[in-house]
Image (tube, grey):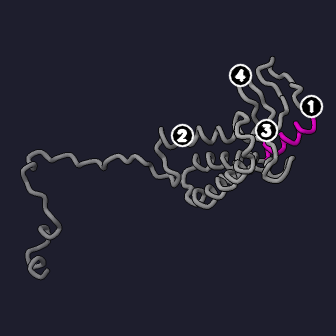
């Protein structure tokens, strides 16, 4: 499930970027849904909200480290399908933007990310950004509300149920297996 989500997300991101780069003019918006959504092609050298434009190579290397950590440390421990989806979305998004940083101008590890989806009062984004955001929300839900660990174990365990006391036996001391054995077995042991 992890691989399927990651590959579908990455494929959607790369294919939509290829289409918009081929068909959209930079900074000439295409209005959709009565202006609720616009397609506006920009090339982002920075991170979220175009911040950190001087650190493009750092963002690319950080993306590589995130992918290595997820693939080597987290994916082998997957035991819950929701975590497989969350980590698949995370890897799809990180990989999608990393592909731009590696293969797009102005050069390797300095490439600008293609962004093209614009909502009112929101920065322009792409499918990879949607994958990363969805992964973050799902990870928070799993970690906070459901308390489900990556291996499928629950973080918050309920205490084991205590047996109901039998009426009239409250004052009787508990017995061990040795007390229950016949007398001559106790003498041998």
Q: Nearer the viewer, residue 120 or 56?
A: 56
The residue identified by callout 1 is: 25
Please tell me the numbered disc located at residue 140. Answer: 2
Q: Position of residue 37 (x, y in %)?
A: 78, 24
**For mark 3, what is the residue?**
44
Look at the image and give the residue range highlighted in magenta: 11-23
Label whose residue precedes the other's in the sequence (3 or 4): 3
Sequence order check, earlier mark of 2 and 1: 1
The residue at which mark 4 appears reads as 121
Task: From the viewer's side, name the closer residue of 159 and 45.
Answer: 45
Residue 175: image x %, image y %?
A: 13, 62
| Residue 8 visible within the image | no
Residue 173 screen position, x and y as percent:
9, 57
88 vs 129, nearest the viewer: 129
Q: Horizontal and vertical percent for residue 166?
A: 15, 47
Do the numbered discs 4 and 2 sit on residues whose CB atoms are within 8 Å?
Answer: no
Residue at image coords 71%, 26%:
122
Residue 95 falls left or right of residue 157 = right
Is 68 on the left-hand or right-hand side of 168?
right
Q: Secondary structure at mark 2?
A: helix
The reply to whether the magenta stretch includes residue 19 is yes
- Residue appearing at x 78%, y 41% in the figure: 45
Looking at the image, is mark 3 or mark 4 nearer the viewer? 3
| Apparent side of residue 152 relative to residue 28 in the rendered image (left or right) | left
């Amino acid at each position: 499930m992890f691989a399927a989500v990651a590959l579908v997300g990455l494929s959607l991101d790369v294919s939509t970027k290829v289409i918009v780069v081929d068909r959209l003019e930079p900074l000439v918006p295409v209005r959709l849904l009565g202006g609720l959504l616009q397609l506006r092609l920009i090339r982002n050298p920075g991170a979220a909200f175009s911040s950190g434009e001087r650190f493009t190579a750092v963002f690319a290397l950080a993306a590589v480290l995130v992918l290595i950590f997820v693939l080597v440390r987290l994916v082998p421990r997957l035991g819950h399908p929701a975590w497989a989806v969350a980590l698949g979305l995370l890897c799809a998004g990180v990989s999608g933007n990393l592909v731009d940083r590696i293969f797009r101008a102005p050069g390797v590890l300095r490439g600008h990310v293609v962004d093209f989806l614009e909502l009112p009062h929101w920065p322009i984004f792409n499918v990879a950004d949607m994958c990363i955001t969805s992964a973050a929300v799902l990870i928070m839900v799993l970690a906070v509300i459901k308390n489900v660990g990556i291996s499928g174990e629950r973080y918050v365990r309920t205490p084991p149920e205590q047996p109901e006391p039998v009426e009239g036996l409250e004052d009787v001391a508990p017995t061990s297996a040795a007390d229950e054995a016949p007398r001559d077995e106790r003498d041998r042991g």
